[in-house]
Amino acid sequence: MEISAIGSSQVNFGKTNVGFCSFSKNLNSKIYNSKNNPKTCNFCQDQNIVWHTKSSFGITLKASNIRAEAAVISEKASKITRRRPVDGVKLYVGLPLDTVSDSGTINHARAIAAGLKALKLLGVEGVELPVWWGIAEKQAMGKYDWTGYLALAEMVQKTGLKLHVSLCFHASNEPKIQLPEWVSQIGKSRPDIYFADQSGQPYKDCLSVSVDDLPVLEEKTPIEVYMGFCESFKSSFSAFMGSTITGVSIGLGPDGELRYPSQRQSPKDSSQPGAGEFQCYDKNMLSNLKQHAEKLGNPLCGLGGPHDTPSYDQSPISNGFFMDGGSWETPYGDFFLSWYSSQLVSHGDRVLTRAAETFKDVSISVSGKVPLMHSWYRTRSHPSELTAGVYNTINRDGYEAIAEIFSRNSCNMILPGVDLSDDHQPNEFRSSPELLLAQIMSSCRKHGVEVLGQNSLVSGGPKVIEQIKKNLLDENAVDLFTYQRMGAYFFSPDHFPSFTQFVRSLKRLNLHSDDLPRKDDEAANSLPDNNLHRQVA
């Protein structure tokens, strides 16, 4: 999402035509298809906001006289009949990944303010905000700058929405958000703080689990630094805790998920989802493996990782490890996979334990995110899960141990992929997001872990929306669902009407005939699968 200021009272949304004006019967709102017509509604007119299609590169939002915002929102919202969804699902929307800039200010603040009002009027309960380690603790260890995030929290509070905060201890490629500068400086002389694959290539977007308890960050351990960050956050946002801020999720690895960075982009063919590669080749991981093997009396098993595994972009059966009857089914395979997964589970337990302790005296929930590595799930070995660190195969349930640590620490589990269906997965990749999601949720039910859902891809297509509703409204419904993610496409005529219908179907709003989308609108909002893209924090 690219938004730039134009003069003193205009904000330009980047390279996607944007418009949202289909809120409720009291707003008598319509989306206009003509490029020459402004996209307006009563709400926009009352606020002197006009959506103009400026060019093929975007639209301009004029906000010359936004007055008495809270009062207007309250008045209009009171006229909309809302009901809780029958299954009690709370609906949140993710804010842009770059909501707060690298310099600590709010990006495109006027556009976000307008978006928050739209969500409030639509009946959304709250928003999710990514808080980046590389922004809030950028310059030096223990030197925090919460300015932009505090301003955003106040903006959300004034709008009357709730806020779920994701504390991100990883980097992002799009938008480009790095680890703290002082951490990257340490990494230049100590590359062993990062994960490494079999070729020795480091993964610099997060720290290796092998250094959790090692004083590698200016004589402090990463766990100590993470918890110092959490303590400062809790103190700085104390005025919002339990009222506006209802939950905090703790980053556990790449994209915030409890996994190894096994699926790095291949330079050859990124459309081929290979098995991924094991990430056990940094100095400290190899040392841990060696010690573990010696302790069990099998020193030869600790000399390194498996040698018969495919590379990132290769089919899982191109080498022997993941084939039926391959090394994964041998005593060595069980030894290695048990150790590899235990390192990840122990990391998750350490972080969740300390996070739960940090936030135990405030009325918020603590969550962590688990990946949905669904490629090759219909094979016996489940290679994508194995390389990611989940020892889950046809013979073994790898999610029991993960659900157990969430249960022990009274933490909620965030699951992505609630929007994915088996019907849209290529047959050659033997994928099944639906079966995998059901397996993980079964483990959560067994251990009493509350599940929070997210979508992995953005699409306005009715089939995707129906898949989300199916997962939210069945007997295993999640407590809270976060729709990812606000931005230019989210508010575009290609997407927002479908999202509006989705919210209304969950909230069971009383609709006016003017608000119902025309058949041609529904067709225009359906996008092919090849236009989908991941939305992760």
Image (cartoon, grey):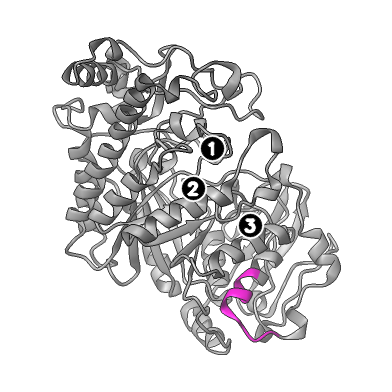
Residue drawn at x 72%, y 46% as measured from the top left: 529
The type of residue carrying mark 1 is Glu
Tell me the CA gap for discs 2 and 1.
Answer: 8 Å
Please give the residue where the numbered disc 2 appears in the rendered image: 97
The type of residue carrying mark 2 is Leu
Q: Earlier in the sequence, mark 1 or mark 3?
A: 1
Please give the residue where the numbered disc 1 appears in the rendered image: 174
Q: Classify 10 Å Cα crowding around label 1: few (below 14), some (14-19), many (20 and above).
A: few
The type of residue carrying mark 3 is Phe
Above or below, 508 relative to 254: below
Which disc, if any, is residue 490? 3
- Contact, mark 2 vs mark 1 (Cβ under 8 Å): yes
Q: Is residue 492 visible?
A: yes
Residue drawn at x 41%, y 46% as measured from the top left: 370
Residue span colored magenta: 502-511
Front residue (pair 130, 432):
432
Label the magenta part by its dominant secondary structure. Answer: helix
Does the magenta run of residues contain 507?
yes
Does the magenta run of residues contain 248?
no
